[in-house]
Every structure is written in C-alpha cells, then in structure tokens.
Amino acid sequence: MRETLAKERDEIESGSGSHKADEEFHRLVAQASQNSVLTESVEHLWTLRKRSRMWEQLHQRIFDRGYQKKWLDDHQAILTALQCRDPQMARQAMWQHLENVRMTLLELSDVDDPSFDAYLFDTDPLAAVNDLKK
C-alpha cells in the first residue's frame, strides 16, 4: 500500500490524469480486509465508474485537481490506521475519506443539470449510521 501511495503521489504531481494508483489503493484495502464481499463490491464499483458517462463528464469539467492531494492525505490516514491495527482509527479515517469525496463531488457537480441527483448528497452518512444505533 505504501508503494501504491507513492505511485498515486507521482500521478498527481505529473498531472497525468491517471487514477490507476487510486483504484489500486482501494482494491488493496478491500483485499486486506479478507472480506470477499467487500473485495467484489470494490471491483464492481470501479468497473461501474469506468463505464460511467457522468463520471467522465465530471472529470472533463475539473481543472483544479487540488482535491486529489486531499484524498491522498485521506489514503495516508487510512494506511496509518491499518498499520497501527486500530479499527476505530481506521473506521474514522475511512468515513472521513468518504465524507471528503462526497463533499468534493457535490462541489464539482453541475447542480443545474436536470439529471443531477442532489438528494444523494443531502444526508450525512455518519448521521444515518448514528441514527440506526439509537
């Protein structure tokens, strides 16, 4: 995973626009969980992302890729938590990453597009989980 983060950093610094290391990092985290359902889900989600017209259009509109550095920092926090073998820290790091991705995608999306599904972004996923625990 450390090597993959170094590759991801190189991709960002070179401005290549490649997301191969990002994808690889997510796959490695899923595989490290030793949960075959999670691993297959991550594989499926990346396949869907690659085929997504919406995702392609979104990336064509993004000129400031500063968010990638933030997400790389998120990945480092996830790796650090895994290295510490701290499940609570890992859970928090992953949730923070998901929240950062959610907020970034909302900021970058074309909210005036009639097909934009803003309702997907209206809820805080942590609040929903906490509500279920009550």
Image: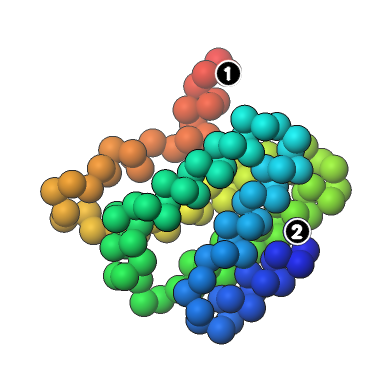
Q: Are marks 1 and 2 in contact (CB under 8 Å)?
A: no
The disc labelled 1 sits on which kind of residue?
Lys
Residue drawn at the location 34% of the way across and 52% of the way down? 52
The disc labelled 2 sits on which kind of residue?
Met
User: Is residue 70 visible in this depiction of the protein?
Assistant: no
Residue in front for this viewpoint, 6 or 65? 6
Residue in front for this viewpoint, 134 or 99? 99
Give the mark nearest the N terminus, 1 or 2.
2
Question: Where does label 1 land, which residue?
Answer: 133
- 121 is higher (above) or lower (below) than 68: above
What coloring was used for the rendering? rainbow
The percent position of residue 101, horizontal first and vertical second, equals 48, 53
List the single residue furthest toward the top: 134
User: Label 1: few (<14), some or many (≥20) within 10 Å?
Assistant: few
Residue in front for this viewpoint, 64 or 2? 2
Mark 1 residue element: helix
The percent position of residue 35, horizontal first and vertical second, equals 70, 32
- 34 is higher (above) or lower (below) than 43: above
Mark 2 residue element: loop
The percent position of residue 64, horizontal first and vertical second, equals 40, 76
Residue drawn at the location 70% of the way across and 60% of the way down? 76
Residue drawn at the location 42% of the way across and 51% of the way down? 49
User: Is residue 109 visible in this depiction of the protein?
Assistant: yes
Spatial CA span between label 1 and label 2: 32 Å
Side of 54 relative to 74 (left or right): left
**What's the mark number on residue 1?**
2
